[in-house]
């Protein structure tokens, strides 16, 4: 190369660059301005240029440099223009989220009860021993407390209300609601909150949700409880779903019951509906157990300042997660998935 006239070479390059059409801007930059690019090569020839031509050579080099840069800009621009007008490119869609399935269930459950005059409330999820146990007819050291695998909070106990605990059930809202209403029924409360127990396996999470109903007024009886359960069963699981109450024991209700709902997958028969005679895939006997209920114990009414000789009430409480998975006919292997933040799981709801 150095055999040729450097100025002539520079001029050739000036022409050559004009003809560069089918090249990407980035490739052009490398070809001309790169470390071993053509511009660098030609400028290195300055040593071969006689002194009286050095000025002309310098000017030509400058021209060349400007030309390369011009070309680069025009290539860049034509690329941007293309992008601007490419109507065939697919549009960018925003991802649309939705409420967490458990939030959806809480909304639906609340609305069902609000329709028949229940008042949705929320009470502390870290509460005193008094509201969680003692006011519910479970004196200190009573063995019934062991059923609730309680997390205790390491704070100084209140001399009247005792230690603080993570609420093991939403029943702590019962006496709190009586106090809020200054012990004056009627009370129609639905309390939905997080609850906590020392348990963690495929069917239990340390944090889960419960909802608690409480109705107190003159003349409230078991029929009112049963009617409310039937109403919920039909509204939440669909027409034809029935409720059933079985005798049980809770310290804060007398009498106490366990509540079952008929399986809405097999219509409560316990059999598949294909005449195969095989058992329903989802239930064992046509029923699902969901939670507890009963007539409010006189001691609980007293703790809330309400005269049990004048007023009676019923209460019920059970888990949102279980109530919801039953509705969907879901056999979720691991209930902890609900709180794993796993989008592939959550996006299905
Ligand atoms: N609190 C009970 C539990 O977590 C459930 C329960 C049973 C609530 C009976 C009630 C009730 O209001 O009357 O296991």
Image (cartoon, grey):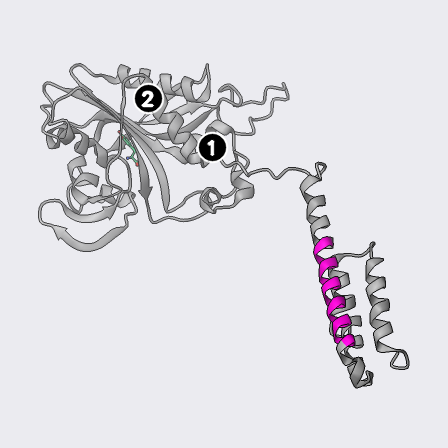
Q: Is residue 95 left or right of residue 157?
A: right
| Residue 346 % position (x, y) | 51, 39
Q: Is 72 one of the magenta-colored residues?
A: yes
Between the C-alphas of marks 2 and 1, the distance is 19 Å
User: In this view of the protein, which residue sits in the foreground, 274 or 181?
Assistant: 181
What label sits on residue 317 in the rendered view?
Answer: none
Q: Which residues are magenta?
A: 56-74
Residue carrying label 2:
113
| Residue 150 % position (x, y) | 28, 48
Q: Which residue is painted at 56% across and 22% down in the image?
A: 271
Q: Which residue is painted at 33% across and 46% down in the image?
A: 197
Q: Please tell me whether the stretch drawn in magenta is mainly helix, strand or loop.
A: helix
User: In this view of the protein, which residue sits in the foreground, 112 or 318?
Assistant: 112
The residue tagged with tag 1: helix, strand or loop? helix
Residue 85 figure quarter: top right
The residue tagged with tag 2: helix, strand or loop? helix
Vertical order, 20 against 122 (above or below): below
Quadrant holding ligand 1?
top left
| Residue 258 % position (x, y) | 33, 28
Q: Is residue 118 left or right of residue 74?
A: left
Vertical order, 71 against 200 (above or below): below
Residue carrying label 1:
325
Q: Is residue 51 left or right of residue 252?
A: right
User: In this view of the protein, which residue sits in the foreground, 118 or 205?
Assistant: 118
* N-term-proximal mark, 2 vs 1: 2
For this orientation, the residue located farthest to the front is 52
| Residue 285 % position (x, y) | 48, 25
């Amino acid at each position: 190369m150095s055999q040729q006239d450097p100025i002539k070479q520079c001029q050739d390059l000036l022409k050559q660059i004009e003809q560069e059409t089918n090249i990407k801007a980035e490739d052009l930059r490398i070809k001309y301005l790169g470390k071993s690019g053509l511009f660098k090569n030609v400028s290195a020839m300055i040593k071969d240029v006689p002194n009286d031509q050095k000025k002309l050579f310098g000017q030509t080099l400058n021209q060349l440099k400007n030309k390369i840069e011009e070309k680069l800009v025009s290539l860049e621009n034509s690329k941007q223009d293309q992008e601007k007008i490419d109507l065939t490119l697919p549009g960018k869609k925003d991802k649309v989220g939705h409420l967490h399935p458990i939030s959806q269930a809480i909304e639906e459950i609340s609305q069902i009860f609000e329709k028949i005059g229940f008042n949705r409330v929320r009470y502390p999820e870290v509460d005193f021993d008094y509201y969680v146990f003692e006011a519910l007819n479970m004196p200190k050291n009573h063995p019934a407390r062991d059923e609730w695998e309680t997390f205790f909070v390491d704070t100084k106990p209140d001399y009247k209300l005792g230690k603080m605990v993570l609420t093991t059930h939403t029943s702590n809202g019962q006496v709190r609601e009586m106090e809020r209403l200054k012990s004056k029924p009627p009370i129609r409360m639905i309390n939905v909150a997080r609850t906590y127990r020392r348990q963690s396996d495929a069917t239990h999470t340390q944090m889960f949700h419960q909802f608690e109903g409480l109705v107190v007024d003159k003349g409230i009886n078991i029929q009112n409880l049963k009617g409310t359960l039937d109403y919920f069963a039909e509204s939440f699981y669909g027409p034809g779903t029935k409720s059933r109450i079985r005798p049980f024991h809770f310290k804060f209700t007398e009498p106490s019951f366990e509540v079952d709902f008929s399986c809405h997958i097999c219509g409560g028969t316990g059999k598949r509906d294909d005449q195969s005679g095989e058992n329903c895939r989802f239930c064992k006997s046509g029923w699902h157990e969901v939670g507890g209920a009963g007539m409010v114990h006189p001691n609980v009414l007293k703790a809330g300042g309400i005269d049990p000789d004048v007023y009676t009430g019923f209460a019920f409480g059970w888990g949102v997660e279980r109530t919801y998975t039953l509705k969907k006919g879901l056999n979720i292997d691991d209930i902890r998935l609900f709180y794993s933040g796993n989008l592939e799981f959550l996006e299905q709801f």
